[in-house]
Amino acid sequence: MRPVEKCGVFGIFGHPEAANLTYLGLYSLQHRGQESAGIVSSRDSTLHSYHGMGLVSEVFSREIIASLPGEIAIGHVRYSTAGASHIKNAQPFVVEYSRGSLAVAHNGNLTNALRIRDELEAYGSIFQSTMDTEVIVHLIAQSRERSLADRVVAALQQVKGAYSLVFMSDHELIAARDPNGFRPLVLGRLEDAHVVASETCAFDLIGAKYLREVEPGEVLVINEKGPRSIKPFEKTTNSLCVFEFIYFARPDSIIFDQSVYAVRLALGRQLASEHPVDADVVIPIPDSGFPATIGYAQQSGIPLELGLIRNHYVGRTFIEPEQSIRHFGVKVKLNPIKDVIKGNRVVLIDDSIVRATTGRKIVKMIRNAGAMEIHFRISSPPITYPCFYGIDTPVRKELIAATHTVKEVEKYLTSESLGYLSREGLKECVGDRDHSFCYACFTGDYPVPIPIRPEESQMTLFDREDRNQ
Amino acid sequence: MRPVEKCGVFGIFGHPEAANLTYLGLYSLQHRGQESAGIVSSRDSTLHSYHGMGLVSEVFSREIIASLPGEIAIGHVRYSTAGASHIKNAQPFVVEYSRGSLAVAHNGNLTNALRIRDELEAYGSIFQSTMDTEVIVHLIAQSRERSLADRVVAALQQVKGAYSLVFMSDHELIAARDPNGFRPLVLGRLEDAHVVASETCAFDLIGAKYLREVEPGEVLVINEKGPRSIKPFEKTTNSLCVFEFIYFARPDSIIFDQSVYAVRLALGRQLASEHPVDADVVIPIPDSGFPATIGYAQQSGIPLELGLIRNHYVGRTFIEPEQSIRHFGVKVKLNPIKDVIKGNRVVLIDDSIVRATTGRKIVKMIRNAGAMEIHFRISSPPITYPCFYGIDTPVRKELIAATHTVKEVEKYLTSESLGYLSREGLKECVGDRDHSFCYACFTGDYPVPIPIRPEESQMTLFDREDRNQ
Amino acid sequence: MRPVEKCGVFGIFGHPEAANLTYLGLYSLQHRGQESAGIVSSRDSTLHSYHGMGLVSEVFSREIIASLPGEIAIGHVRYSTAGASHIKNAQPFVVEYSRGSLAVAHNGNLTNALRIRDELEAYGSIFQSTMDTEVIVHLIAQSRERSLADRVVAALQQVKGAYSLVFMSDHELIAARDPNGFRPLVLGRLEDAHVVASETCAFDLIGAKYLREVEPGEVLVINEKGPRSIKPFEKTTNSLCVFEFIYFARPDSIIFDQSVYAVRLALGRQLASEHPVDADVVIPIPDSGFPATIGYAQQSGIPLELGLIRNHYVGRTFIEPEQSIRHFGVKVKLNPIKDVIKGNRVVLIDDSIVRATTGRKIVKMIRNAGAMEIHFRISSPPITYPCFYGIDTPVRKELIAATHTVKEVEKYLTSESLGYLSREGLKECVGDRDHSFCYACFTGDYPVPIPIRPEESQMTLFDREDRNQ
Amino acid sequence: MRPVEKCGVFGIFGHPEAANLTYLGLYSLQHRGQESAGIVSSRDSTLHSYHGMGLVSEVFSREIIASLPGEIAIGHVRYSTAGASHIKNAQPFVVEYSRGSLAVAHNGNLTNALRIRDELEAYGSIFQSTMDTEVIVHLIAQSRERSLADRVVAALQQVKGAYSLVFMSDHELIAARDPNGFRPLVLGRLEDAHVVASETCAFDLIGAKYLREVEPGEVLVINEKGPRSIKPFEKTTNSLCVFEFIYFARPDSIIFDQSVYAVRLALGRQLASEHPVDADVVIPIPDSGFPATIGYAQQSGIPLELGLIRNHYVGRTFIEPEQSIRHFGVKVKLNPIKDVIKGNRVVLIDDSIVRATTGRKIVKMIRNAGAMEIHFRISSPPITYPCFYGIDTPVRKELIAATHTVKEVEKYLTSESLGYLSREGLKECVGDRDHSFCYACFTGDYPVPIPIRPEESQMTLFDREDRNQ
């Protein structure tokens, strides 16, 4: 069953331009998912929705936004994983059930979705998508509770895993975050309206004020009476995703009550302390490696330079000539500035290494540009385990650090040296004093049990091909 | 709940080019629905599907057909009714349930779908479309029977109304027709493959041989062992839709075991006998009025001429100038040949009158072209009741013959005379000796009970706006 | 050089909705060309234009029509010939030259365009299209005359061949027809506005009144002072294209001052007189064979029936299965009604035979449907020579009647008999007493000299591939 | 007449994948023009071309590249200026004339194009576009010289202004640069093939080796015999566009034989020397302000931080809510990182100021984010005159520095201070010892005479609306 991984969610209650502001919010969250986008709004007891494949700015037109009336709206952006780019998997998910219409946007990944789905199907339930989100909706429809809030709580008490959810009916907005708080979810205010979003950067664009996090284990019901907080789950330790800080969130966001940029800067400084090197220049792999590079340069005193230029016009497909061009794949995105590299000892900074194939190509490209030495520095520990809580990582055997020592990875990269940030250094940079973060991708210590056959939660059980026009 | 009205269905089992032949079959059935088209095929336990809005030739490309592999396929074309042109209502309908994947294509209209849906939702079922077909699928999913055939039978025993259905799983094709046999469904053979379709014209294009009708009340299970016929319903009288002969089916088809063209010719002859007139020329309203006009001309001896030319390039939208043009709407489609009309007494033949607004415009256009007299002849009786079995008719108050006498309709049309075919004449032309046809639209005698508030079955219960890209 | 063959032209002067009415006019002339459509309008000394590939109803939207302001407009529809479907060859052709802007729409084919183009290029002229129309524009631009009318006359005095032209500047509309009058061009009036069009059917839709033909050799200048007629050419005999009556024009049009339908009816009657046969039924090849079939049936007394049904949803491309289907190509468009054909002696009527390949397939399809005998009757004489005046015919060797006797064609068609209309019969039906028609496709007597290497005028000299997005 | 401003050109001779490599070259030059893209290739004496509106990666598909065969190709990307986005203005420009086919791609702006066009039209020439490039083509067509090279030289001797041109016939590639050398043009080699491009970044992607500049006043003829250099113009001083270094070229390119990145770094250092300030942080306006910011930080010792994050998913249109959002326009692209700014004295670096409206919004946005002081530093002198040589600048009255003192601009920007780089500083940074650069936009000293009514060369003379589908 398909995890709903690497997504962004947004919701607003009580604003006459709810859909347009949701559109802007999604636009700010675009880095969390570029495959599809959707918005649902409500007016006169009717939900209005529109979904499309592609970027927010491509999917929505002025006419479409105008066709989404009302003062409540939720939206979703979804990440593209190969082979599953179906419009039917676009969110928010909208259904009709006995109590009316319901829409939901989900960021995260349930670890017991398959088992629940099997049970539901055994009793005759029909599933229309391959998303684990649909399990939650079925549980809500089958709940005997009367209010939507109670039904949502009843459903969430049955599911396990990571979720930051935004529900809407025709008169209510409900935000919910799993008890461990894996994925971020923040609450803000715009005049009389309340807004929730995956990151605060969505608030900045629409001019909303950041109030606080939706807390781990909190179900926040927002209607005409204002927000009401429910804490229906047993208290557990927090397991905030540290990878949001390392790579995934936007640097101008505040998540988990800290500035992402400040954390990344600290990671770079810590990296310089842990892995100093005598070099002439420190260069980032753009754009995500930038903040850590600034930190590294500040701490080490080695001058920062732009050594790689990123082409921002990269399209989705690319027509390669038959006659091969060296390092073509990486050259399409990055080009070295010879002037900066030639004859120099280069420190190259990236935020993480997954398979190391791109890193190897970049090292060779920089070597070709005339670097004397290349020292690769990574502002995170080695990734040795897959994520089951909503980040799209490959299966374990494809994670180079899971199967190779640091020395072996260094050799593969062909760099003069390689330095990963230590787990302790990471912990210190995020200020984790009470074990409130999830480091499972680095340690394999999963705070919520994962399926026995873990691949199941990382693969689609069935992947019926269906593409609407 | 939305009836699945005015549709065409097709299915094939046991041919290596199943999807391509389904495409051709749908192409031949295009007159039964121009809103959307879809095909589902099966290979390696997986259903592959594609749906799109528009004509068959627009929706499918060579690449799409190639992406629908396997030896089993079903297809569907759907008619456009205003406001409900959603891709989510395109068929075949495909779902996952405990026993795997299932697809279904439906022509007809269930009369108790709303009531069943209410019950299902009360027990937590979630509906994804507004089509009554979905009720059948839920009933199949909840059946405790083991084989698909038994589950289909169990489901159909609960629904009432009109249906010609084609189901497919990954290894089986099942065709089913309601006990009254309202809508046509025919069985054919192409080499080793079996095919079912709404009309035989779909067989002609692919070179399949017409074997027989799928009989009223028959469930025909086609798999590797060949076809197996089940008759699970109590015997009832047939109620074949007479309007298929009058207007809906293609003249080159055989349905209900008779040639559509031959029936229409007979209707025209009978009309001439019942409503003779002294005139110079008899002209058809193209294209549907043609066969009856030939019959009328043959019987009356009045020469047939083309008096109205139809523009076959009519697009879906049309940009009308602000300054009004007389009879513009009808002129876009039809233009009179003055030479044929000027100074002549004209007999004008059409197959039916619903609202009479177009007929009135045509009469005025022909009058403007110089006709001395205009005698309107209709090759069917007055339509006085709406259809609840799958033909798209307006609510009763919009049927001009339901609220006006023939004299009043004649006056509205501004023709010198108006003659409808008699019910007895119609009966005789279709050779109905044992009351095996449905004449409800002319008589109000509904062979299967209709909902107490009949509008319910003609309107959508809810019509959530959702448009996929 | 590419002849501008098989096109429709339209122009209007003095109406506030000039572009919208041009759109409607082109819509009515769609049968004259389906490849591309274009409209040019004028306001405030500026020409506004829009061209697109496809049908009129596809190319233009309300927004586009609204972007074409002013009270003067001309339009053009163009026929698709394989391989030359370039947007750059769409008309009207619009250029800037020393006296301002000029647009022109052309129906016809110049016989000396290549020679003039060679001369113009030798003096440094640059051509932007492969259309012979561009030669006229260059000659206008190089003329030393002062008024546009005089420049047009000066240009037309240098070209030879067939042309019905509509020019517009920012304040004037000029219609011109070659001295022989090969192609039709009619003048009408709509309130204070004047309109010109290839056929009168364009007037019917917009409610304009037919005034008269633009005469052969007439140059009609329409501006704020009203129309002014110039006859600048030496008097010559008329050479009206008889094939417009046989096939090309719409049956509801008046061209060359006669009803097209009436002529076709007469052709059918004459055909019955010349080639009687003892048969049970006479059937048309739809749609173009219809009027002649009515005439044949009337004259012969043999009953007319619909034996072939045409599918009007035929798309531009068609996905054929790999496994061949008998007569597939023709079946996509036509399907026989067995009931009409089986056991009968059939007279089959078509308007003309070019290559006979389709006719052969139709005969076989009717034979398969059970015909006892098939008698093919053609309402025109054998086509034995290509046209150089604007009708798209193949080169001579592909015309079956140019290389085979009637007996041989009959054998190829596999029909029991074949009868062509005689030339004398044709002449009588069009009422040609003073040799005012062109019969060159039947006789090879070309009224205007054709190029020594005739292929040149039928082929493109160069066919640069250029496709705009 | 429309200047062909802000464009990129590419050409290749002698490679079997000429079109594909041109596609890659254009992709690397995308920053020089995003409005339209086009490629022309040659095989078998025929030119093949394709043009489209949009980005290179959107315009071309694998099929289209495959349809552009041959070993010679040229390409062009064009910048979008409001209102003139017509496919007909897309380049390369392709024409037919007496000697065959010719294609040309142009970067620059002719200053006497209008006058020449008037003369050509007076002698009957017809123009198809509103681009000044077309004047060159007409002059070539009218030249009496025999070889293409000689005709090109003859044509270029009549035009004045800025041009870097790439011509191709079916067997030859010709690159030409105006005598002043305003715009860059570089020569490279890829195996046996020769390539020319606006910047060396196009060589990097395809793996070509940079050989040298095409020199000012050089006409380089490349055919099967290899390259042949002609210097047909009188020697004049160089006038290399200094703005290419400041803003326009990619930082990873070498143009005018210097590294763009190195120059920008030097500009930032010089700026710090000329305008030091006591501050806490120096931040770039991304992405173009980056290199100068690094230089400023290095020279001043003030730490560089990312204070503004750029959204790289910005689409072409943006749906703004009716209720205004503060600084909305700039927020869509940029968002401040409060953590970096709050309580700090900020140095803000940009490469240039044109109208200052965006700069003013950025200052306010940073102020809102909590900056104590904002010191705006610009790595170029005040722009006080428009460019007539191919850079798209507004008319003079819209250049804020043309009408306001530095103090007034500072006040408008609402920054605590404003510092522009001095002209002398700029001169030093680009190493201009022999007056070989053009500084006209800063000084008004135009090295090539501009039209008396300068607006003419900055506006379209006529701007006929024509949009192809």
Image (tube, coloured by chain):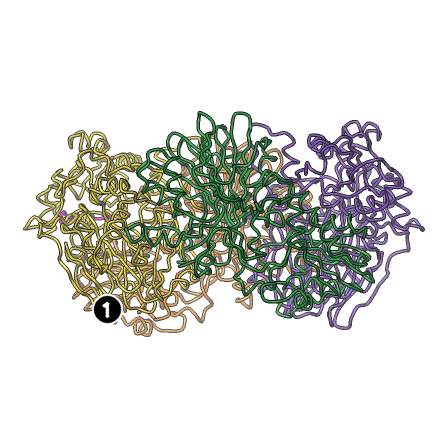
Chain colours: A purple, B orange, C yellow, D green
Q: In this view, does A53 lie above or below B62?
A: below
Query: Is residue C303 highlighted in magenta?
Result: yes
Q: Which residue lies furthest to the left in this view?
A: C433
Residue D201 image offset from top left, x and y in percent: 60, 39
Residue C452 placement, left or right of C190? left
Q: Is residue D159 above or below residue B285?
A: above
Residue D38 image offset from top left, x and y in percent: 48, 43
Residue B263 image offset from top left, x and y in percent: 33, 51
Q: Which of B446 and C96 is in front in this view?
A: C96
Q: Residue furthest right?
A: A433
Q: Give the number of callouts.
A: 1
Q: Is residue C414 above or below residue D300?
A: above
Q: Residue at x 78, y 64 (%)?
A: D373
Residue D242 placement, left or right of C279? right
Q: Which chain carries label 1?
A: B
Q: Which amino acid does label 1 sit on?
A: Asn
> Which residues, given as a range, are shown in magenta?
C298-305
Q: In which quarter of the image is the N terminus of chain D?
A: bottom left
Q: Residue at x 91, y 55 (%)?
A: A235
Residue B130 image offset from top left, x and y in percent: 58, 58
- Tell me the quarter of the picture where residue A196 sits: bottom right
Residue A111 appears in the picture as rendered? no
Query: Is residue C318 highlighted in magenta?
Result: no
Residue B3 appears in the picture as rendered? yes
Name the residue carrying label 1.
Answer: B368
Q: Which of D5 and A203 is in front in this view?
A: D5
Q: Nearer the viewer, residue A267 or B361?
A: A267
